[in-house]
Amino acid sequence: MQVFECDGVHLYWDLPIATYRTILANKPDIVVMNRIWSRVFLVDITILYDEKLMKAKTETKLKYLDLVHEIVDMWGVEFAEIIPIVISTNGLIPVTLAHHLR
C-alpha cells in the first residue's frame, strides 16, 4: 500500500478502492483526495500507439465513471473527477491534457 499524506491532501497509488458494491475498475493509477476542498481526482496513465489517443481518453473516462459516483457517495466529497493522461509511444499528447492538469 502506497500512501502519502500532507496538509489535508492524501495521495494513493497502486491501491484498489474498496466500495460498497462490486466495481471491476476500482484501481486507478493515482488517487488524490483533498479533504480541505472536498475533492477527489482519479488519475489514469495510458501509453499507446498514436492513432488511438482520443479513443483511449474516452474509454478511460467511461471505465472509471461508476467508481467516481461511488466515491462521491461513500467518502462524502462534493466533487470527483477522472483525469486521463494519455501519451503516445512517439510522445504525442491530446490537446485536452493541459486542461486536465490545471
Image (cartoon, helix red, strand yellow):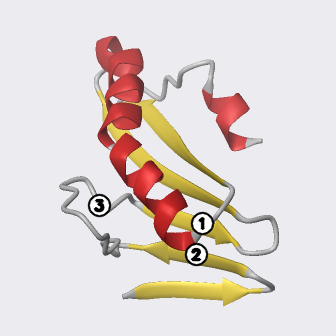
Circle 2 residue: 11
**N-term mark: 3 or 2:** 2
Q: Is residue 19 left or right of residue 35?
A: left
Q: CA distance from mark 2 to mark 1?
A: 5 Å
Q: Secondary structure at mark 3?
A: loop
Please tell me the numbered disc located at residue 32.
1
The kind of residue tagged 1 is Val
Q: Residue at 73% of width from left, 65% of height from top?
A: 38
Vertical arrangement, residue 7 with respect to residue 61, above or below: below
Vertical arrangement, residue 71 with respect to residue 10, above or below: above
The image position of residue 15, as x and y in percent, is 34, 75
Q: Nearer the viewer, mark 3 or mark 2?
A: 3
Circle 3 residue: 26
The image position of residue 85, as x and y in percent, is 49, 39
Q: Residue at 37% of width from left, 53% of height from top?
A: 67
The kind of residue tagged 3 is Asn
Front residue of 65/13: it is: 65
